[in-house]
Image: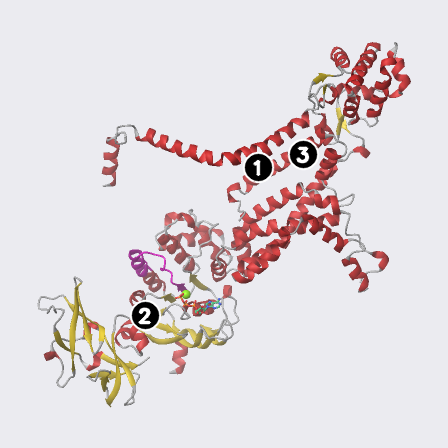
Amino acid sequence: MADTLRQDTFVEFDHVQKSYDGETLVVKDLNLSMPKGEFLTMLGPSGSGKTTCLMMLAGFETATHGEIRLDGREINNIPPHKRGIGMVFQSYALFPHMTVAENLAFPLEVRGIGKSEREKQVKDALDMVQMGSFGSRRPAQLSGGQQQRIALARALVFRPELVLMDEPLGALDKQLREHMQFEITRLAHELGITTVYVTHDQTEALTMSDRVAVFDDGRIQQLAPPDELYEAPQNSFVAQFIGENNTLDGVIKEVNGGRALVQLDDGSLVDAKPVNVSKVGERTRVSIRPERVEFDMSRLEDGAHTLKADVLEFIYMGDIFRTRLRVAGNDDFVVKTRNAPDQVRLTPGTQIEIGWNADDCRALDAT
Amino acid sequence: MADATADIIQSQPQKLTTKDGKPLKAALAASQSRAKRKAFFLVLPLLAFMVLTFVMPIVQMLHQSVYNPGFTIHEDVISKEQTPIMVNLRDWFDENPRGTEPDETAYAAIVQDLIVLRELRAQGQAGTRINYERSGSRSLFTKSARRAPRMEAPFKQALLEIDEEWGDPELWAAMRDASSAYTPNFYLAAIDLTRTDDGSVERVNENRALYVNLFQRTLFLSVLITFLTFVLAYPIAHLLATLPLRYSNLLMIFVLLPFWTSLLVRTTSWMVLLQSQGVLNDAMVGTGILADENRIQMMYNQTGTIVAMTHILLPFMVLPLYSVMRPINPSYVRAARSLGATSWTAFRRIYFPQTVPGIGAGALLVFILAVGYYITPALVGGADGQLISNLIAFHMQKSLNWSLAAALASILLAGILILYWLYDRLIGIDNLKLG
Ligand SMILES: Nc1ncnc2c1ncn2[C@@H]1O[C@H](COP(=O)(O)OP(=O)(O)OP(=O)(O)O)[C@@H](O)[C@H]1O
Ligand SMILES: [Mg+2]
């Protein structure tokens, strides 16, 4: 088992730590292994150490502790230019004094590839990003989206097996972003490249990746495929960070198999699934997605606990209705319902009863 | 679809007008010209100042380099009244072609003119003009003018009795040249050429040749100093540009320090350091690196000029370099490295080309300043560390040959303009980045 894992692993962080000033650890004990061809996204708030990890992998920063392995080789002492890792920077970093074609030819040139072969590969790379006719332009004469494509083509033109992208779409508008997200994943899968992608846009992370590593405080909080991340967050940071979420604080009253009974701070009781809490009496934060809240008590299992809720606001959003409730002292309890013919529209000022299936409500650590 | 739109636009060649029916183009031009006039009035004071203090002196200098009325017009110091002088001699020159043996009429003309000079007290001025070409002529003129009123024919003999010089064909050639106020001779002199008796141009005697050599030395030293400042400034500027701001500001103060101290103080401190009894030599002798009798002469020669000027001009190289390096994003070099370039290749192909505008600006600035530098070489240059500007100053202050000074300065100016033009052709003047 351990052997097959090692075979599959292409990129590996092994107990990696990093400190810039020798006092605070920016990256604390990072462990990560990626198989070949995977599209992995590092997602996390600003300052959580994503860029630092990427820089260590690319060779521009050295890990203060631990090992980074690429294809089984330890790369801590290999200089950046020998790692053969393609990289796309947030600022694109297209060389301003060279034309687009010269930019793309640069990695081939330093590898000593002959002129005619070079021209062919540059042309192929430009065609790949649908920029075939822009070879003679300067980067300054391109739009942001076009520069982005060129940066991508340049990172791919020398056929690296691993490509790193640090918020490559940060400077683009929403529509272009969505288009480029699609382009990037398409290329990555077509070419079979292993990709490490950094972003702090969670939609981007969820739509593009095979797996997402949620960073916070220099650690990976959870590493999982997008659906698992959304539906089964392992701790309250991840639950809060990914998607919209309602939280209620309380204390564990009872734990029974896969069920926990939680007494909220106002005294009411709810059912939840214990995730990273186990002891009776432990403080917990229960987390429930807005679309998993039920108004129709008949659809709950027998004996399920329910809560009283005051309707504060009803927002019509077209495809969905968004209702804000006061539940157990929390004024920001949001419920989303689909705009269907039989759907009830709640009126502000009324009091209703809500509940949920215990599996949809996760009892997480109280931070 | 796009074509259809184009058709519509084409089929309606309607003239755009303003609301009250005037053509829009004319209205736009009128309003723009008002704005331009306003802008012009704003810069007018500076323009006037520049014309008065910069353009006019240059024009005057250029004029003076080809015009010297020392042998043709006398201007009274007080009344400013202008009187033509050497009228008779100039008439004789006009009537007789170059190479004619001066006859009695010529000598008679000179004596008459000398009498006029004496009355006007202009013999010194006329003598000085000839003195530019032949030393000793000034005293010849004053001496002869004093005795001219008492001379009797034959005048040739009378003059030759005063001084044999009066028979020298070279003197006559010089007087002929000086007899027209407009002359290219100062330019000839400025590049070590002279006119022979028959008017053809030839090189001056080897031991009197001076200026070409000096121009060459000025050029060579300026190039060398520019290069040295570049070599010294590039790493510093790079360091300044990459360091966090709070350190780089501190370092920048050290770079700028020379700007805040007087040029004289800086130059003299180099003298204290470098002279043969100076700090550096003392230190080397004291530590036994050097024997006392082998003290190195680093001052009052070219070395002194080079060291002191390199130091003084260094900030002019550092600042433009810094200003182009600061905004260069470190991700360019990183990108190059990740694309497979060694750090040297990344520097050579990616970083360096982006700093070229700064190098150009710094080099141009330092070179132009160095070519015209005066005080430092005057103080620490000794004999062989003098630059052309020191000679220009000499002719302005000591020999009072302003026309020659102007000719030398004009050549210097022309050289710099050519350099500027070359720079524009090679690098493009709009790439110049000074800060
Ligand atoms: N060169 C550096 N020197 C010192 N500290 C640094 C350096 N680079 C980053 N840091 C610090 O390390 C921490 C992590 O930075 P990093 O750039 O990795 O964050 P990030 O997750 O990429 O954030 P963002 O989403 O804003 O890009 C931050 O607190 C930052 O201040
Ligand atoms: Mg970052």
* Residue at far right of view: B161
Q: Where is residue A13 in the image (x, y as percent from the top left)?
A: 43, 75
Circle 2 sits in a helix, a strand or a loop, which is it? loop
- Whether residue A176 appears in magenta in the rendering, the answer is yes
The verdict on a common chain for dots 2 and 3 is no
Visible in this render: residue B394? Answer: yes
In this view, B58 is above or below A218: above
Quarter of the image where one finds residue A72: bottom left
Q: Position of residue B328 (x, y in %)?
A: 49, 55
**Type of the residue with mark 1:** Trp
Q: Where is residue B420 in the image (x, y as percent from the top left)?
A: 58, 39
The label shown at residue B409 is 3
Q: Name the residue under label 2.
A: A210
Judge left or right: residue A304 versus residue B14.
Answer: left
Q: Position of residue B315 (x, y in %)?
A: 61, 51
Mark 3: few/some/many CA within 10 Å (<14, 14-19, 20+):
many
| Front residue of this view, candidates A286 and B152 | B152
Tell me which segment is drawn in magenta: A162-183
Q: Mark 1 points at which residue?
A: B421
> Which quadrant of the render holds ligand 1?
bottom left
Mark 1: few/some/many CA within 10 Å (<14, 14-19, 20+):
some
Circle 1 sits in a helix, a strand or a loop, which is it? helix
Q: Which of marks 3 and 1 is nearer the N terminus?
A: 3
Quarter of the image where one finds residue A367: bottom left
Judge left or right: residue A110 versus residue B414.
Answer: left
Are dots 2 and 1 in contact, CB under 8 Å? no
